[in-house]
Image (cartoon, helix red, strand yellow):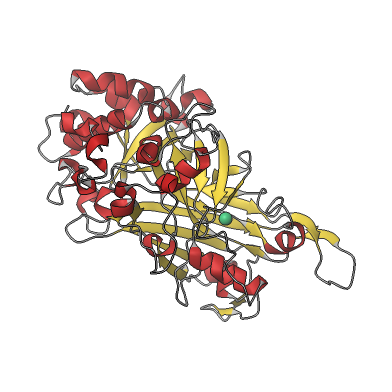
Amino acid sequence: MNPNNTETNPPSAAEAAPAAAPLTDATHDPALRSWVASANVPGADFPIQNLPLGRFRPPADEGPGHADGADTLRVGVAIGDQVLDLKLAAQQCPWPEEIYPLLAPLAAGDLAAFMALGRPAWRALRAALSAALAEGSDQGPFLELCLRPRAGLRMAMPCTVRDYTDFYVGIHHATNIGRLLRPDNPLLPNYKWVPIGYHGRASSVGLGGPVRRPHGQQRPNPEAPPVYGPCQRLDYEMELALWVGVGNELGRPVPIEKAEEHLFGVSLLNDWSARDLQAWEYQPLGPFLAKSFATSVSPWVVSFEALAPFRRPLLRPGGDPAPLPYLHSAANHSHGSFSMTLEVWLQTAAMRSAGQGPVRLSQANAAEAAYWTPAQLLAHHTSNGCNLATGDLFGTGTLSGPGPGQGGSLMELSQGGREALQLPVGEQRRYLHDGDTVILRAFCEAPGAVRIGLGQLSGTVLPA
Ligand code: CA
């Protein structure tokens, strides 16, 4: 394979020439087209420049040995409106010899084992998939037989979530929420120094779909004792999921220069939140049952390689403190952030009945929203020696923009429930009602690059 693909940031040159890192390669060429025609449609989420990986269950009618069960999970690559089944692709298509060891865990349905192989393997497979799916590839006639329509495919979690940490990198979200709680002192003094986070609950992380409104303890009347009952202020949070590919040993912090070598890719994440439970329980230790009833992630994991054309410098307003040395590197400063548009859409049960499609509630850009980069989060998380492993999941925190219509939660859009949002069929919302479907979408656009998307993450509220 291309030897340049294994060299990201020579230590001796890292400080002197951060821009020397090979951010893009032939797989990002905007002229590249796929023999899968739907991948070439402008605006497609999954053009050949993207190549996200995910897991799915093959249809049950494929015959003996294909019954439902964890052992039948397959790994696929989303390409246009199709999915390339990597079990079939490994069996039925010739590949360069060095690619077979990389395909082996994927053909076995074990995405985590591939995530553990590290960046040189990830880049080598991406190059091989790009070549195989490109127009004119000799492998096309073999791989045509390994495609499945993406619509209707039953997706599974990319891997077992080993541990889950939710950060709080959205500075406008932190400010908006802080203003509702503490009008005179919205942003706490630690915010610009230390990436804030809490240890979340891995057991209730799943794909989108139905989410049951939780019960919990709340205190709607501050003059009366608390009560236990269904959540009345159910909310979503628009976040990104960061998947850890390569872990670190207990007691061995990962320096920020190496942090991205541990990060495999990104998905969408909805941190469902019960605001009434949260308001009563959060002091002094932070979120607990207000968050742990459900967290949803989207099934396709977009690699950091695919995001290369959309990297941005880390933006800090003038006068803000420089990151402490363990959270600073020249590369992180010059291109550690990512420009990505995130959106929340809502469709209520009444809208569905009236044939009314989802309406967009908000839109924000991740580079503008996030005060800390993925590399800074991983470096900080391990800075005390905490060990991460393959399948660890980070939530970024709610990625709200600075302006109106850019809040990544209903709590922000409704000013803490004070101002109702007007919906198309005469409805109003302050918080979510039963039957509401929340849809998260995200995509990246930049001059000279082909747009890529993360797909979507959709979840519907069920009654308590
Ligand atoms: Ca959150």
Q: Quadrant of the C terminus?
A: bottom right
Residue at the location (73% across, 66% down)? 232
State the residue in front, 184 or 414.
184
Residue at the location (39% across, 41% down)? 256
Q: Position of residue 31 (x, y in %)?
A: 12, 50
Residue 85 in the figure: left or right of residue 282: left
Q: Is residue 316 above or below residue 145?
A: below
State the residue in front, 10 or 433.
10
Q: Is residue 11 above or below residue 436?
A: above
Q: Position of residue 197 (x, y in %)?
A: 57, 50
Q: Position of residue 327 (x, y in %)?
A: 43, 48
Q: Position of residue 178 (x, y in %)?
A: 61, 69
Image-quadrant location for residue 315: bottom left
Q: Is residue 87 above or below residue 277?
A: above
Task: Report if residue 452 is visible in the image.
Answer: no
**Where ligand 1 lies, by quadrant?**
bottom right
Image-quadrant location for residue 188: bottom right
Residue 181 in the figure: left or right of residue 258: right
Residue at the location (11% across, 30% down)? 138
